[in-house]
Image (spheres, grey):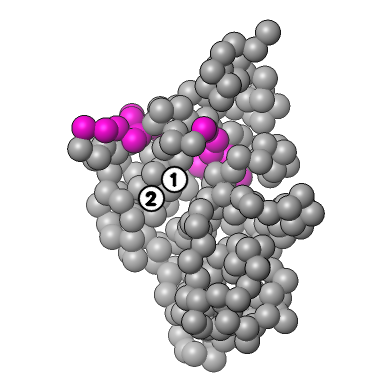
Amino acid sequence: MSLLRLDDVSKSYGGVSAVRNFSFDVEEGEVIGLMGANGAGKTTVFSLIAGTQPVTTGQIWFAGQRIDQKPAYLISRLGIARTFQIVRPFSGLTVLDNLIIAAQHGHDRAPSRSSADARSRAILQEVGLADQANRLAGTLTLAGRKRLEIARAIATGPRLLLLDEVLAGLTATEVAAALEMIKHLRQHYQLTLVVIEHVMRALMKLCSRIVVLHHGEMLAEGAPADVVVDQRIISAYFGKRAS
């Protein structure tokens, strides 16, 4: 049984369709890339899975339970966590307190403040922010805020982690370091990942399978090496058939 399954999921805003009849499965332990040009519907798919937007039609299943009719906080408690393209930590709180709040909610809720503190400090060590624990979150660099975003999601104790462009805006050196961190976290916390990313080399390194969205519909699905030479995808990105 798949850990996550989307069956003919559609999302419309008035007369505009953001996602149309989209279906895919994710097995436990997989790392799946979700690829597409801007406006293809990728982040909308994440919002539907995480429950921050309701589906218009179709069904979403997680660990054998239908979740498309559940509120976001219950979906989080089932074991799904996500990051956001635009990171918005609790800027006036410390880095540590941002994680403690997350650790007290979600799938693996800490039973006490002390246990939330211990878990949060361990995660900060894993993401390279241990020395920033008492710093206000709003004063971190972009790379630091991206790491904090991932750390907050991890603190909820997810089985499935949805990463939405966590490499965007980073330098090449920062991208390489973030990739190594994500690989480590995936193994250490036994995570299943779905990753939205425009940095193709990152998807090639992380993912065993890539799903391509175009105008809200699945355009292609396959191994990274096959996807990068698919003429349909090249046309979707560049507007013409490559010669």
Which part of the image, by quadrant, shows the C terminus?
top right
Residue at x 33%, y 61% (from the top left corner): 72
Magenta span: 15-37
Measure the alpha-carbon separation of dots 1 and 2.
6 Å
Q: Which residue is mark 2?
A: 47
Instruction: Report the front residue among 65 and 22.
Output: 22
Answer yes or no: is residue 167 visible.
yes
Q: Residue 67's x, y, as percent?
A: 32, 52
Q: Residue 232's x, y, as percent?
A: 55, 17
Check disc 1 and give the amino acid type: Thr
Give residue 142's mark.
Answer: none
Residue at x 57%, y 77% (from the top left corner): 137
Q: Is residue 165 left or right of residue 48?
A: right
Contact between labelled residues 2 and 1, with CB atoms less than 8 Å apart: yes
Q: Is residue 109 above or below residue 88?
A: below
Dot 1: within a 10 Å radius of its alpha carbon, few (fewer than 14), some, or many (20 or more) residues? many
Check disc 2 and give the amino acid type: Ser
